[in-house]
Amino acid sequence: MDTNLPTDPSTGSPERRAQVSSQPKPLANHNHQASGPSHQPDLSSPDLSSPDLSSPDLSSPDLSSPDLSSPDLSLTAGTTSAENADAADQPWPPPPPRDQTLPRPRPVLSPWQQAIGPLCGLLSAILYTASNIGLRQCVDVNPYVVSAMKATPNLVLLTPWIVMHWAWKQQSSHTHSRPANPAKRATPSARHTRTRLIDFTVAAIFAQFLGNVAFQKALELIGISTVVPITLGTIIVCGAILGVVILKESIGLRKLIAMLTLITAVVVLAIPSQDSMDSQSPAEAKRQLAATDQASIAAEPSPSGLSNDSTVTESASVGSAASSKRAWQIIFGSGWAILSGLTYAYFGVAMRRSLRDGIGSTTLMLISGAVGVGLLWGYSLIQLGLIQISEIHARSWLWMSFAGLCNFIAFITLTASLKRLPLVAVNLINASQVALAATAGVILFSEPITVTLVVGLVLTLTGLMILARRTRASIVVTD
Protein backbone atom coordinates (compact mmCIF):
# COMPACT_ATOMS: atom_id res chain seq x y z
CA MET A 1 0.00 0.00 0.00
CA ASP A 2 1.24 3.42 -0.92
CA THR A 3 1.74 5.44 2.25
CA ASN A 4 2.61 8.64 0.40
CA LEU A 5 -1.09 9.50 -0.25
CA PRO A 6 -2.12 12.96 0.84
CA THR A 7 -3.64 13.05 4.25
CA ASP A 8 -7.15 14.58 4.60
CA PRO A 9 -8.00 15.67 8.06
CA SER A 10 -11.66 14.76 7.52
CA THR A 11 -10.86 11.19 6.48
CA GLY A 12 -8.00 10.28 8.73
CA SER A 13 -5.44 7.64 7.83
CA PRO A 14 -4.77 6.29 4.34
CA GLU A 15 -6.61 3.03 5.19
CA ARG A 16 -9.62 5.02 6.18
CA ARG A 17 -9.48 7.01 2.92
CA ALA A 18 -9.35 3.75 0.92
CA GLN A 19 -12.47 2.46 2.69
CA VAL A 20 -14.35 5.66 2.06
CA SER A 21 -13.40 5.71 -1.61
CA SER A 22 -14.60 2.11 -2.06
CA GLN A 23 -18.15 3.00 -0.87
CA PRO A 24 -20.79 4.15 -3.45
CA LYS A 25 -21.01 7.86 -3.93
CA PRO A 26 -24.16 9.85 -3.36
CA LEU A 27 -26.57 10.74 -6.18
CA ALA A 28 -25.18 14.25 -6.57
CA ASN A 29 -21.73 12.90 -7.44
CA HIS A 30 -22.93 9.96 -9.54
CA ASN A 31 -21.76 11.50 -12.83
CA HIS A 32 -18.30 12.40 -11.51
CA GLN A 33 -15.55 10.36 -13.18
CA ALA A 34 -13.03 9.01 -10.64
CA SER A 35 -9.37 8.52 -11.47
CA GLY A 36 -9.03 4.93 -10.23
CA PRO A 37 -10.99 1.77 -10.53
CA SER A 38 -11.97 2.01 -6.88
CA HIS A 39 -13.88 5.21 -7.60
CA GLN A 40 -16.26 3.59 -10.31
CA PRO A 41 -19.62 2.49 -8.89
CA ASP A 42 -20.69 -1.10 -9.43
CA LEU A 43 -23.75 -1.11 -11.71
CA SER A 44 -23.87 -4.83 -12.24
CA SER A 45 -26.13 -5.43 -9.29
CA PRO A 46 -28.93 -3.17 -8.10
CA ASP A 47 -28.52 -1.42 -4.84
CA LEU A 48 -31.68 -0.54 -2.94
CA SER A 49 -29.87 2.22 -1.09
CA SER A 50 -29.41 4.34 -4.26
CA PRO A 51 -31.84 5.07 -7.06
CA ASP A 52 -31.35 3.01 -10.22
CA LEU A 53 -32.32 4.97 -13.35
CA SER A 54 -32.10 1.95 -15.62
CA SER A 55 -35.45 0.52 -14.41
CA PRO A 56 -38.75 2.31 -13.79
CA ASP A 57 -39.30 3.46 -10.29
CA LEU A 58 -42.87 4.14 -9.06
CA SER A 59 -41.53 6.59 -6.47
CA SER A 60 -40.09 8.99 -9.05
CA PRO A 61 -41.51 10.07 -12.42
CA ASP A 62 -40.00 8.33 -15.43
CA LEU A 63 -40.30 10.46 -18.55
CA SER A 64 -39.08 7.71 -20.88
CA SER A 65 -42.34 5.68 -20.61
CA PRO A 66 -46.01 6.78 -20.44
CA ASP A 67 -47.23 7.37 -16.95
CA LEU A 68 -50.93 7.02 -16.08
CA SER A 69 -50.57 9.68 -13.40
CA SER A 70 -49.55 12.44 -15.85
CA PRO A 71 -51.04 13.23 -19.28
CA ASP A 72 -48.94 12.29 -22.29
CA LEU A 73 -49.77 14.66 -25.17
CA SER A 74 -47.45 12.99 -27.71
CA LEU A 75 -48.94 9.49 -28.00
CA THR A 76 -49.72 9.42 -31.69
CA ALA A 77 -49.68 11.97 -34.44
CA GLY A 78 -53.20 11.14 -35.62
CA THR A 79 -55.03 11.73 -32.33
CA THR A 80 -56.25 15.03 -31.00
CA SER A 81 -55.34 16.54 -27.68
CA ALA A 82 -58.79 15.74 -26.28
CA GLU A 83 -58.39 12.05 -27.19
CA ASN A 84 -54.92 11.98 -25.66
CA ALA A 85 -56.20 13.57 -22.48
CA ASP A 86 -59.03 11.01 -22.29
CA ALA A 87 -56.61 8.17 -22.85
CA ALA A 88 -54.23 9.43 -20.17
CA ASP A 89 -56.86 10.35 -17.60
CA GLN A 90 -58.94 7.19 -18.06
CA PRO A 91 -60.03 5.99 -14.60
CA TRP A 92 -60.06 2.36 -13.56
CA PRO A 93 -62.34 0.59 -14.09
CA PRO A 94 -63.24 2.57 -17.22
CA PRO A 95 -66.81 3.96 -17.38
CA PRO A 96 -69.21 2.84 -20.14
CA PRO A 97 -68.89 4.78 -23.39
CA ARG A 98 -70.94 7.93 -23.59
CA ASP A 99 -73.57 8.14 -26.33
CA GLN A 100 -74.19 11.69 -27.46
CA THR A 101 -77.28 10.66 -29.49
CA LEU A 102 -79.39 9.48 -26.57
CA PRO A 103 -82.86 11.08 -26.48
CA ARG A 104 -83.85 13.49 -23.82
CA PRO A 105 -85.41 11.90 -20.75
CA ARG A 106 -89.17 11.79 -21.03
CA PRO A 107 -91.05 13.90 -18.55
CA VAL A 108 -92.92 12.11 -15.81
CA LEU A 109 -96.62 12.60 -16.41
CA SER A 110 -99.37 12.48 -13.86
CA PRO A 111 -102.32 10.10 -14.42
CA TRP A 112 -104.46 13.05 -15.49
CA GLN A 113 -101.89 14.15 -18.09
CA GLN A 114 -101.64 10.59 -19.39
CA ALA A 115 -105.42 10.44 -19.74
CA ILE A 116 -105.59 13.63 -21.85
CA GLY A 117 -104.49 11.84 -25.04
CA PRO A 118 -107.05 8.99 -24.95
CA LEU A 119 -109.81 11.38 -23.85
CA CYS A 120 -109.08 13.76 -26.72
CA GLY A 121 -109.05 10.85 -29.15
CA LEU A 122 -112.39 9.57 -27.93
CA LEU A 123 -113.83 13.08 -27.99
CA SER A 124 -112.69 13.55 -31.60
CA ALA A 125 -114.43 10.31 -32.63
CA ILE A 126 -117.64 11.45 -30.93
CA LEU A 127 -117.46 14.89 -32.54
CA TYR A 128 -116.79 13.48 -36.00
CA THR A 129 -119.80 11.22 -35.56
CA ALA A 130 -121.88 14.22 -34.45
CA SER A 131 -120.73 16.09 -37.56
CA ASN A 132 -121.78 13.17 -39.75
CA ILE A 133 -125.15 13.09 -38.01
CA GLY A 134 -125.63 16.77 -38.82
CA LEU A 135 -124.71 16.10 -42.45
CA ARG A 136 -127.12 13.15 -42.51
CA GLN A 137 -129.92 15.47 -41.42
CA CYS A 138 -129.26 17.66 -44.50
CA VAL A 139 -129.57 15.02 -47.24
CA ASP A 140 -132.41 17.01 -48.85
CA VAL A 141 -130.21 20.13 -49.23
CA ASN A 142 -127.88 20.82 -52.15
CA PRO A 143 -124.55 19.05 -51.37
CA TYR A 144 -122.46 22.05 -52.45
CA VAL A 145 -124.25 24.32 -49.98
CA VAL A 146 -123.82 21.74 -47.22
CA SER A 147 -120.10 21.37 -47.97
CA ALA A 148 -119.67 25.16 -48.05
CA MET A 149 -121.27 25.50 -44.62
CA LYS A 150 -119.10 22.67 -43.33
CA ALA A 151 -115.93 24.54 -44.38
CA THR A 152 -117.06 27.95 -43.09
CA PRO A 153 -116.15 27.49 -39.37
CA ASN A 154 -112.54 26.70 -40.30
CA LEU A 155 -112.18 30.09 -41.95
CA VAL A 156 -114.25 32.08 -39.45
CA LEU A 157 -112.61 30.68 -36.31
CA LEU A 158 -109.04 30.28 -37.53
CA THR A 159 -108.60 33.69 -39.18
CA PRO A 160 -108.52 35.72 -35.91
CA TRP A 161 -106.15 33.19 -34.36
CA ILE A 162 -103.77 33.34 -37.34
CA VAL A 163 -103.81 37.15 -37.36
CA MET A 164 -103.10 37.39 -33.62
CA HIS A 165 -100.34 34.79 -33.83
CA TRP A 166 -98.74 36.55 -36.79
CA ALA A 167 -98.86 39.93 -35.02
CA TRP A 168 -97.32 38.46 -31.88
CA LYS A 169 -94.61 36.76 -33.92
CA GLN A 170 -93.77 39.98 -35.74
CA GLN A 171 -93.56 41.92 -32.50
CA SER A 172 -91.39 39.26 -30.92
CA SER A 173 -89.04 39.15 -33.93
CA HIS A 174 -88.56 42.95 -33.90
CA THR A 175 -87.89 42.93 -30.17
CA HIS A 176 -85.61 39.94 -29.68
CA SER A 177 -83.95 39.25 -33.01
CA ARG A 178 -81.96 41.02 -35.67
CA PRO A 179 -83.71 42.43 -38.72
CA ALA A 180 -83.89 40.14 -41.70
CA ASN A 181 -81.51 40.64 -44.57
CA PRO A 182 -83.47 41.65 -47.70
CA ALA A 183 -80.92 39.91 -49.91
CA LYS A 184 -81.80 36.54 -48.33
CA ARG A 185 -85.54 36.56 -48.82
CA ALA A 186 -85.62 34.29 -51.88
CA THR A 187 -83.89 31.33 -50.24
CA PRO A 188 -84.30 27.73 -51.46
CA SER A 189 -86.25 26.83 -48.31
CA ALA A 190 -88.72 29.62 -49.01
CA ARG A 191 -89.22 28.40 -52.56
CA HIS A 192 -89.63 24.88 -51.26
CA THR A 193 -92.25 26.06 -48.79
CA ARG A 194 -94.14 27.87 -51.53
CA THR A 195 -94.12 24.69 -53.62
CA ARG A 196 -95.51 22.68 -50.72
CA LEU A 197 -98.23 25.27 -50.13
CA ILE A 198 -99.23 25.12 -53.80
CA ASP A 199 -99.36 21.33 -53.68
CA PHE A 200 -101.46 21.42 -50.53
CA THR A 201 -103.83 24.00 -52.06
CA VAL A 202 -104.43 21.67 -55.01
CA ALA A 203 -105.11 18.81 -52.60
CA ALA A 204 -107.51 21.04 -50.64
CA ILE A 205 -109.42 21.85 -53.83
CA PHE A 206 -109.90 18.14 -54.50
CA ALA A 207 -110.85 17.42 -50.89
CA GLN A 208 -113.35 20.27 -50.60
CA PHE A 209 -114.89 20.25 -54.07
CA LEU A 210 -114.87 16.48 -54.66
CA GLY A 211 -114.37 14.84 -51.25
CA ASN A 212 -116.97 16.69 -49.20
CA VAL A 213 -119.52 16.83 -52.02
CA ALA A 214 -119.06 13.12 -52.82
CA PHE A 215 -119.44 12.24 -49.13
CA GLN A 216 -122.69 14.21 -48.94
CA LYS A 217 -124.06 12.55 -52.09
CA ALA A 218 -123.19 9.14 -50.65
CA LEU A 219 -125.11 10.00 -47.48
CA GLU A 220 -128.15 10.81 -49.64
CA LEU A 221 -128.06 7.36 -51.26
CA ILE A 222 -126.83 4.74 -48.76
CA GLY A 223 -126.83 6.33 -45.29
CA ILE A 224 -124.30 7.01 -42.56
CA SER A 225 -123.86 3.42 -41.34
CA THR A 226 -122.49 2.32 -44.73
CA VAL A 227 -120.76 5.50 -45.94
CA VAL A 228 -118.42 5.88 -42.96
CA PRO A 229 -116.78 2.40 -43.11
CA ILE A 230 -116.44 2.54 -46.91
CA THR A 231 -114.86 6.01 -46.80
CA LEU A 232 -112.58 5.11 -43.91
CA GLY A 233 -111.37 1.87 -45.51
CA THR A 234 -110.64 3.69 -48.75
CA ILE A 235 -108.71 6.40 -46.89
CA ILE A 236 -106.44 3.86 -45.20
CA VAL A 237 -105.81 1.73 -48.30
CA CYS A 238 -105.28 4.62 -50.71
CA GLY A 239 -103.31 6.56 -48.09
CA ALA A 240 -100.87 3.67 -47.72
CA ILE A 241 -100.45 3.36 -51.50
CA LEU A 242 -99.95 7.10 -51.96
CA GLY A 243 -97.52 7.07 -49.02
CA VAL A 244 -95.35 4.57 -50.88
CA VAL A 245 -95.51 6.51 -54.15
CA ILE A 246 -95.18 10.09 -52.82
CA LEU A 247 -93.57 9.82 -49.38
CA LYS A 248 -91.44 6.74 -50.14
CA GLU A 249 -92.87 4.85 -47.17
CA SER A 250 -92.82 1.09 -46.81
CA ILE A 251 -95.65 -1.41 -46.38
CA GLY A 252 -95.06 -4.33 -44.07
CA LEU A 253 -96.81 -7.68 -44.03
CA ARG A 254 -99.17 -6.67 -41.24
CA LYS A 255 -100.23 -3.49 -43.04
CA LEU A 256 -100.71 -5.44 -46.27
CA ILE A 257 -103.02 -7.92 -44.53
CA ALA A 258 -104.97 -5.04 -42.99
CA MET A 259 -105.29 -3.38 -46.41
CA LEU A 260 -106.63 -6.56 -48.01
CA THR A 261 -109.12 -6.92 -45.16
CA LEU A 262 -110.34 -3.35 -45.60
CA ILE A 263 -110.64 -3.78 -49.37
CA THR A 264 -112.79 -6.85 -48.77
CA ALA A 265 -114.94 -4.85 -46.35
CA VAL A 266 -115.45 -2.08 -48.92
CA VAL A 267 -116.49 -4.61 -51.59
CA VAL A 268 -118.92 -6.34 -49.23
CA LEU A 269 -120.52 -3.06 -48.19
CA ALA A 270 -120.85 -1.95 -51.82
CA ILE A 271 -122.75 -5.10 -52.89
CA PRO A 272 -126.53 -4.56 -52.81
CA SER A 273 -128.36 -7.11 -50.68
CA GLN A 274 -132.02 -8.09 -50.77
CA ASP A 275 -132.75 -6.32 -47.50
CA SER A 276 -131.08 -3.12 -48.66
CA MET A 277 -132.94 -3.17 -51.99
CA ASP A 278 -136.26 -3.37 -50.17
CA SER A 279 -135.46 -0.17 -48.28
CA GLN A 280 -135.41 3.43 -49.43
CA SER A 281 -132.56 5.86 -49.79
CA PRO A 282 -132.18 8.40 -46.98
CA ALA A 283 -133.19 11.28 -49.26
CA GLU A 284 -136.33 9.47 -50.44
CA ALA A 285 -137.21 8.46 -46.88
CA LYS A 286 -136.92 12.06 -45.73
CA ARG A 287 -139.02 13.32 -48.63
CA GLN A 288 -141.64 10.69 -47.88
CA LEU A 289 -141.66 11.70 -44.23
CA ALA A 290 -142.18 15.33 -45.21
CA ALA A 291 -144.99 14.31 -47.58
CA THR A 292 -146.59 12.25 -44.83
CA ASP A 293 -146.54 15.21 -42.47
CA GLN A 294 -148.12 17.46 -45.06
CA ALA A 295 -150.74 14.85 -45.89
CA SER A 296 -151.65 14.35 -42.24
CA ILE A 297 -152.09 18.08 -41.78
CA ALA A 298 -154.18 18.57 -44.94
CA ALA A 299 -156.21 15.37 -44.57
CA GLU A 300 -159.98 15.71 -44.35
CA PRO A 301 -162.57 12.98 -43.74
CA SER A 302 -164.09 11.72 -47.00
CA PRO A 303 -167.79 11.00 -47.42
CA SER A 304 -167.10 7.30 -46.87
CA GLY A 305 -165.35 8.07 -43.63
CA LEU A 306 -161.84 7.24 -44.97
CA SER A 307 -158.85 9.57 -44.75
CA ASN A 308 -157.26 11.06 -47.81
CA ASP A 309 -153.87 9.23 -47.71
CA SER A 310 -153.41 8.60 -51.42
CA THR A 311 -150.02 10.37 -51.45
CA VAL A 312 -148.57 8.07 -48.78
CA THR A 313 -149.89 4.93 -50.48
CA GLU A 314 -148.51 6.02 -53.84
CA SER A 315 -145.03 6.67 -52.40
CA ALA A 316 -144.95 3.31 -50.62
CA SER A 317 -145.95 1.40 -53.77
CA VAL A 318 -143.29 3.15 -55.83
CA GLY A 319 -140.63 2.39 -53.19
CA SER A 320 -141.48 -1.32 -53.02
CA ALA A 321 -141.56 -1.74 -56.80
CA ALA A 322 -138.26 0.02 -57.53
CA SER A 323 -135.85 -2.62 -56.20
CA SER A 324 -133.64 -2.41 -59.29
CA LYS A 325 -133.48 1.36 -58.94
CA ARG A 326 -132.47 0.93 -55.32
CA ALA A 327 -129.66 -1.45 -56.34
CA TRP A 328 -128.21 1.16 -58.66
CA GLN A 329 -128.51 3.74 -55.90
CA ILE A 330 -126.43 1.53 -53.60
CA ILE A 331 -123.78 1.05 -56.28
CA PHE A 332 -123.59 4.76 -57.08
CA GLY A 333 -123.61 5.68 -53.38
CA SER A 334 -120.71 3.30 -52.73
CA GLY A 335 -118.86 4.83 -55.67
CA TRP A 336 -119.33 8.33 -54.24
CA ALA A 337 -118.02 7.10 -50.87
CA ILE A 338 -114.94 5.53 -52.52
CA LEU A 339 -114.26 8.75 -54.45
CA SER A 340 -114.56 10.72 -51.22
CA GLY A 341 -112.09 8.42 -49.48
CA LEU A 342 -109.64 8.69 -52.38
CA THR A 343 -109.61 12.49 -52.29
CA TYR A 344 -109.35 12.49 -48.49
CA ALA A 345 -106.37 10.12 -48.72
CA TYR A 346 -104.58 12.43 -51.16
CA PHE A 347 -105.38 15.38 -48.90
CA GLY A 348 -103.95 13.52 -45.90
CA VAL A 349 -100.71 12.64 -47.70
CA ALA A 350 -100.29 16.25 -48.85
CA MET A 351 -100.89 17.46 -45.32
CA ARG A 352 -98.35 15.03 -43.84
CA ARG A 353 -95.76 16.12 -46.39
CA SER A 354 -96.39 19.78 -45.58
CA LEU A 355 -96.15 19.12 -41.84
CA ARG A 356 -92.80 17.39 -42.39
CA ASP A 357 -91.51 20.54 -44.04
CA GLY A 358 -92.37 22.64 -41.00
CA ILE A 359 -95.69 24.20 -42.06
CA GLY A 360 -98.09 24.51 -39.13
CA SER A 361 -101.34 22.57 -39.02
CA THR A 362 -103.28 25.75 -38.24
CA THR A 363 -102.05 27.37 -41.43
CA LEU A 364 -102.98 24.30 -43.45
CA MET A 365 -106.49 24.20 -42.02
CA LEU A 366 -106.92 27.89 -42.76
CA ILE A 367 -105.93 27.31 -46.38
CA SER A 368 -108.33 24.38 -46.62
CA GLY A 369 -111.17 26.41 -45.15
CA ALA A 370 -110.52 29.39 -47.42
CA VAL A 371 -110.45 27.16 -50.50
CA GLY A 372 -113.66 25.43 -49.46
CA VAL A 373 -115.54 28.63 -48.69
CA GLY A 374 -114.43 30.40 -51.85
CA LEU A 375 -115.02 27.55 -54.31
CA LEU A 376 -118.13 25.96 -52.82
CA TRP A 377 -120.01 29.17 -52.05
CA GLY A 378 -119.13 30.60 -55.47
CA TYR A 379 -120.31 27.46 -57.25
CA SER A 380 -123.49 27.31 -55.14
CA LEU A 381 -124.39 30.89 -56.00
CA ILE A 382 -123.81 30.22 -59.69
CA GLN A 383 -125.78 26.96 -59.70
CA LEU A 384 -128.71 27.83 -57.43
CA GLY A 385 -128.82 31.58 -57.11
CA LEU A 386 -129.31 33.64 -54.00
CA ILE A 387 -133.10 33.28 -53.99
CA GLN A 388 -133.09 29.48 -53.99
CA ILE A 389 -130.40 29.37 -51.31
CA SER A 390 -132.43 31.70 -49.10
CA GLU A 391 -135.39 29.29 -49.32
CA ILE A 392 -133.52 26.59 -47.40
CA HIS A 393 -135.27 25.79 -44.13
CA ALA A 394 -133.89 27.31 -40.94
CA ARG A 395 -133.57 23.87 -39.34
CA SER A 396 -131.25 22.79 -42.16
CA TRP A 397 -129.07 25.87 -41.61
CA LEU A 398 -128.77 24.93 -37.92
CA TRP A 399 -127.79 21.34 -38.74
CA MET A 400 -125.21 22.48 -41.29
CA SER A 401 -123.68 24.93 -38.81
CA PHE A 402 -123.65 22.22 -36.16
CA ALA A 403 -121.86 19.81 -38.53
CA GLY A 404 -119.21 22.38 -39.44
CA LEU A 405 -118.56 23.37 -35.83
CA CYS A 406 -118.26 19.75 -34.67
CA ASN A 407 -115.91 18.99 -37.56
CA PHE A 408 -113.66 21.91 -36.59
CA ILE A 409 -113.52 21.00 -32.88
CA ALA A 410 -112.95 17.34 -33.77
CA PHE A 411 -109.86 18.29 -35.76
CA ILE A 412 -108.50 20.30 -32.82
CA THR A 413 -109.02 17.43 -30.37
CA LEU A 414 -107.57 14.91 -32.82
CA THR A 415 -104.43 17.05 -33.17
CA ALA A 416 -104.10 17.26 -29.39
CA SER A 417 -104.52 13.50 -29.16
CA LEU A 418 -101.85 12.76 -31.75
CA LYS A 419 -99.36 14.89 -29.79
CA ARG A 420 -99.77 12.61 -26.79
CA LEU A 421 -100.46 9.19 -28.32
CA PRO A 422 -98.63 6.87 -30.70
CA LEU A 423 -99.61 7.16 -34.32
CA VAL A 424 -101.19 3.69 -34.36
CA ALA A 425 -103.81 4.92 -31.88
CA VAL A 426 -105.46 6.73 -34.81
CA ASN A 427 -106.77 3.40 -36.03
CA LEU A 428 -108.41 2.71 -32.68
CA ILE A 429 -110.05 6.14 -32.86
CA ASN A 430 -111.25 5.33 -36.39
CA ALA A 431 -112.58 1.99 -35.19
CA SER A 432 -114.68 3.70 -32.53
CA GLN A 433 -115.90 6.17 -35.16
CA VAL A 434 -117.11 3.31 -37.37
CA ALA A 435 -118.99 1.72 -34.49
CA LEU A 436 -120.55 5.05 -33.46
CA ALA A 437 -121.63 5.84 -37.02
CA ALA A 438 -123.29 2.44 -37.46
CA THR A 439 -125.08 2.82 -34.12
CA ALA A 440 -126.27 6.32 -35.00
CA GLY A 441 -127.53 5.19 -38.41
CA VAL A 442 -129.56 2.34 -36.97
CA ILE A 443 -130.96 4.12 -33.89
CA LEU A 444 -131.44 7.70 -35.05
CA PHE A 445 -132.30 7.21 -38.73
CA SER A 446 -133.79 3.69 -38.73
CA GLU A 447 -131.34 2.46 -41.35
CA PRO A 448 -131.77 -1.28 -42.00
CA ILE A 449 -129.45 -3.83 -40.41
CA THR A 450 -128.46 -6.09 -43.29
CA VAL A 451 -126.12 -9.06 -43.56
CA THR A 452 -123.70 -7.14 -45.76
CA LEU A 453 -123.65 -4.25 -43.27
CA VAL A 454 -122.78 -6.56 -40.36
CA VAL A 455 -120.09 -8.45 -42.32
CA GLY A 456 -118.62 -5.22 -43.68
CA LEU A 457 -118.47 -3.63 -40.23
CA VAL A 458 -116.78 -6.72 -38.77
CA LEU A 459 -114.17 -6.75 -41.54
CA THR A 460 -113.54 -3.02 -41.17
CA LEU A 461 -113.04 -3.30 -37.41
CA THR A 462 -110.77 -6.33 -37.94
CA GLY A 463 -108.57 -4.44 -40.38
CA LEU A 464 -108.30 -1.46 -38.05
CA MET A 465 -107.40 -3.71 -35.12
CA ILE A 466 -104.65 -5.35 -37.19
CA LEU A 467 -103.17 -1.91 -37.84
CA ALA A 468 -103.59 -0.87 -34.20
CA ARG A 469 -101.65 -3.93 -32.96
CA ARG A 470 -98.63 -3.11 -35.11
CA THR A 471 -96.64 -1.61 -32.21
CA ARG A 472 -97.02 -1.07 -28.52
CA ALA A 473 -95.46 2.33 -28.05
CA SER A 474 -95.74 4.18 -24.79
CA ILE A 475 -97.35 7.57 -24.38
CA VAL A 476 -95.04 10.26 -25.69
CA VAL A 477 -95.32 14.02 -25.29
CA THR A 478 -93.99 15.94 -28.29
CA ASP A 479 -93.29 19.61 -28.72
Image (cartoon, rainbow, N blue to C red):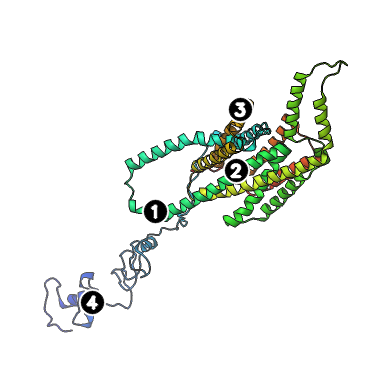
Mark 3 or mark 2: name the one nearer the start of the chain: 2
SS class, disc 4: helix
Front residue of 385 and 367: 385
- What residue appears at the point 11 percent right and 79 percent down from the top-left corner? 6
Front residue of 352 and 375: 375
Q: With 271 as the anchor, is 103 left or right in this view?
A: left
SS class, disc 3: helix
The spot of residue 156 in percent (x, y) is 51, 34
Which residue in the protein does label 1 denote?
186
SS class, disc 2: helix
- Label 3 Cα neighbours within 10 Å, binned few <14 / some 14-19 / many ≥20: few
Under mark 2, the amino acid is Phe
Q: Which mark is residue 398?
A: 3
Under mark 1, the amino acid is Ala
Under mark 3, the amino acid is Leu
Q: CA distance from mark 4 to mark 3?
A: 122 Å
Q: CA distance from mark 1 to mark 3?
A: 46 Å
Which residue in the protein does label 2 denote?
209
Which residue in the protein does label 4 denote?
22
